[in-house]
Amino acid sequence: MPPVRSQVALVRDRLFGPLDGPARIVAVVGARGAGVSTVLQQWRERHETAVHVAPASLPELPPHEASGAVLVIDHGDHLASAEWHQLRRLLDASPQLRIRLGVRSLHGLPPELEVEVVDDLAFTPEELGDYLRENASRADPGAVFLATAGHARAVRAIVTSGVTRRDRFATVLTAAAGGIGLPAAASRLAVPSALTPSIVAALGGPDDFIERAERDGLGSWTPGGGPPVFTLTPLVRAATAATHPVPADDRRGIRQSAAAQLLDEEAWLAAIVEGAQSGRLDLVDVALKRGGMSVLWDHGPAIVRVLRGVPVAQLRRWPVIAMAQALVLNARRQHAIRAAELMGIALLGIQTSARSSPDRALLRVIESVARRLTGFGDGGVKAARAAARTLDEMPPAALEDLAGLLGDLRVHAGISLLYGGHLDEARLQLERAAAAPSRVGIELMAIGGVAMVEALKGDIHAARRWTALAEARTWPTDIVDEYPGSMLRIAQALVALEAGRFADARDRIATIWPIIDTIEHWPILGYVRALIDVRRGAPEDGLEALRLLRQRRGGRLGSASASARLLDLAESTLALAAGDLATARRLKPGAADHPWIWLGAARVAVFEGDDDRAFSLLGRVRAVTPRDRLGLLSLEAVLLRRLGRSDEAGDVARRADALVRGAGVLTPLALVPASDQDLFTLDLPDAPRGLDDVSAAPRLTDRELVVLQQLVHTSRLHDIATSLHVSENTLKTQRRSLYRKLGATSREEALARALAHGLIDDTVAPTRAMNGTDSSTSDTATANRSG
């Protein structure tokens, strides 16, 4: 065995918050070796008023010495009744006194005490990685975490031993256990990684086994992806296995039985662990299906670690398991390639599954999610529709098998339909999800999803009703500003935007912007932020934020995907508001594009003064939603007035006004030229003012551009005509046309305006060129006036 290494301690500030807080009594709770004493010592070293007190010395401590101090008492389980009486007397006599305790379990504390608890002492995977690096350990962090579950003494034992081979970790842990394994009669209880009273009973253990084990510091309660489960420390399990080994076949059978029992008790994560360790992927499959997305949100990294060793050949038989891992890894950019591989495996597995499988609705939703996240094919629309039809046609008895997943299936089918541009179908699936019995996270997604769809459509009154429904509820803080609540936040931002409450809209976006690198709704989030920045008059800020976002996340988007086109629209809209027509006009609509894209391109044409193109683009728009209809009506009204058809323009504008009042959407009116705002007679305090008119660059022919570049270098017509192999009269005609389009009467004025429009390269010193002499300025001016 390698030589024992010295140890560098890891200070974990996250554990110190409650200890620093105002609570009079805070207990650090952990089993043997969990690091209770280390945490208390590290915290005490940071606080001058903290006094370490041994339980035996408490009766000797006068009240006046305790006033204003913080008493740190390790091994609080050893306090006798008299000592607890003394502590209560000190607390009564000294209102400023605070106590920080270390205990193995809460069973050691008097039940009448009000105690704040710190019990999440296990190293997180990130902390374990930091600890290994600081101690120069070459052991694989994932393997160490699987062997130790982050238990402090177990981690330290592996690091200080210098062992890096995972098949030798058990030997190291046994040596570190110091003989604290279970007796032979209870050896089978150390086989599963999770225990419940029913599992203990099935393995022949006593009824009070878990309570006694907790009091003795042999284990603790941990989340199980459902109800908590009791976990013996890895040192206890390793020492028991070494001292009283259980045959391999028996171990496998015990873990399979435990997995089945944990499924019945809805401890999904623990069931996944036991199923994977016993080779029963069918049990893992059931746990993932029944646990749904909430298990992945809460325990995704742990599930990936447990399933990491499952061969690819096996995963093809279990597409749900492959997809679960893919969804977790897809949220972590460094694992994007592996996520795509697993999604491909899931799709292959789904295609080879039997058509008569009772899980066909679930499999089609999985297919839809895989195609949506990877951009394969139609983005999952066909699969989502097939899943929805299957659910609609299932008899009630068959639906009962999916009762816990109905909300998940409807929500994810709806999201795929949303990104496919089928908003009404998406709304239907999300509304059905909201009506189905679901976990709180899925319910939030369903309600928020309906609100977001309505807001995107432009039916702001309907969106406001759904956001009010959500706001009337109290949601857990750990989901409302994470992925489950992201659609609600987007809907709330759009509702606030249309009401003219720009600060409120920004605040709603800000709550979920920190997770924009991990959620799939980031393109919609980026687009909504763009609209907010346009309406609040800060398009330059919006352009910078959007470009940074696309650099970070846009690399995996196909240029023709709906998400990429939405971002193109956002950039064009921001650029138009910023007066950058050159960037705005890059938006070129295609046959498969959403009406938003055609309207965006038509809007640019309106600002450029290219009315014929604007009319042509609008003629391709099939406006169905209130937002699209208002965009179409507002631009038609502007164009009709330009043609001198004022009566028709007024009729169209009045229809736009009525649509605003009926649906509550306003933003499309804010995206027409400010000079045309008088068309619309809205008497609203939050009516938009429109965008500032932009001076459009003239459209020059190729020959006019060549002449313009020649004028940059010289004012001599003879030299230019010779260079271009034309007569001077022909050149004068071309120059006359060029000056007319630029609105110029001289070479200097033409060059200045061409430079302002970005028609010439400013690296060729146009300022110096403009100081030259135009040999026929007067002739040109006369020609322009007469032409």
Image (cartoon, rainbow, N blue to C red):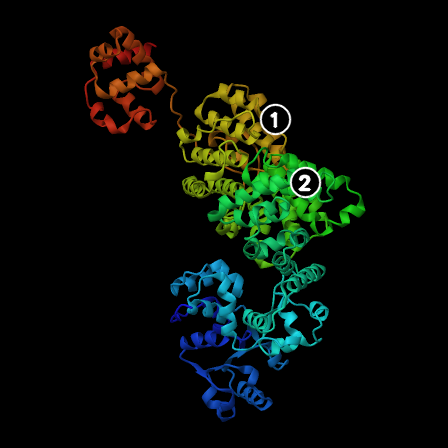
How far apart are labels 2 and 1 at the CA level? 40 Å
> Looking at the rendering, in which quadrant would you find the C terminus?
top left
Residue 467: horizontal and vertical position, in percent? 63, 48
Mark 1 residue type: Arg
Q: Is residue 362 above or below residue 420?
A: below
Residue matched to label 1: 622
Q: Is residue 17 above or below residue 553?
A: below
Q: In this view, does 293 lie above or below 538?
A: below
Q: Quadrant of residue 460?
A: top right
Residue 336: horizontal and vertical position, in percent? 49, 45
Does residue 52 show up? yes
In the drawing, what numbered circle is on residue 423?
Answer: none
Residue 484: horizontal and vertical position, in percent? 59, 51
The residue under the point 34% across, 26% down is 757
Q: How would you rate the neighbour count of disc 1 (Cα within 10 Å): few for under 14, some for 14-19, many for 20 or more?
A: some
Secondary structure of the residue carrying numbered label 1: loop
> Looking at the rendering, in which quadrant would you find the N terminus?
bottom left
Out of 594 and 442, give the one closest to the viewer. 442
Residue matched to label 2: 353
Q: In which quarter of the image is residue 371?
A: top right
229 lies left or right of 754: right
778 lies left or right of 395: left
Residue 662: horizontal and vertical position, in percent? 65, 37
Out of 211 and 67, give the one closest to the viewer. 211
Mark 2 residue type: Ser
Secondary structure of the residue carrying numbered label 2: loop
Does residue 534 show up? no
Q: How would you rate the neighbour count of disc 2 (Cα within 10 Å): few for under 14, some for 14-19, many for 20 or more?
A: some
Out of 168 and 752, give the one closest to the viewer. 168
The residue under the point 61% across, 28% down is 623
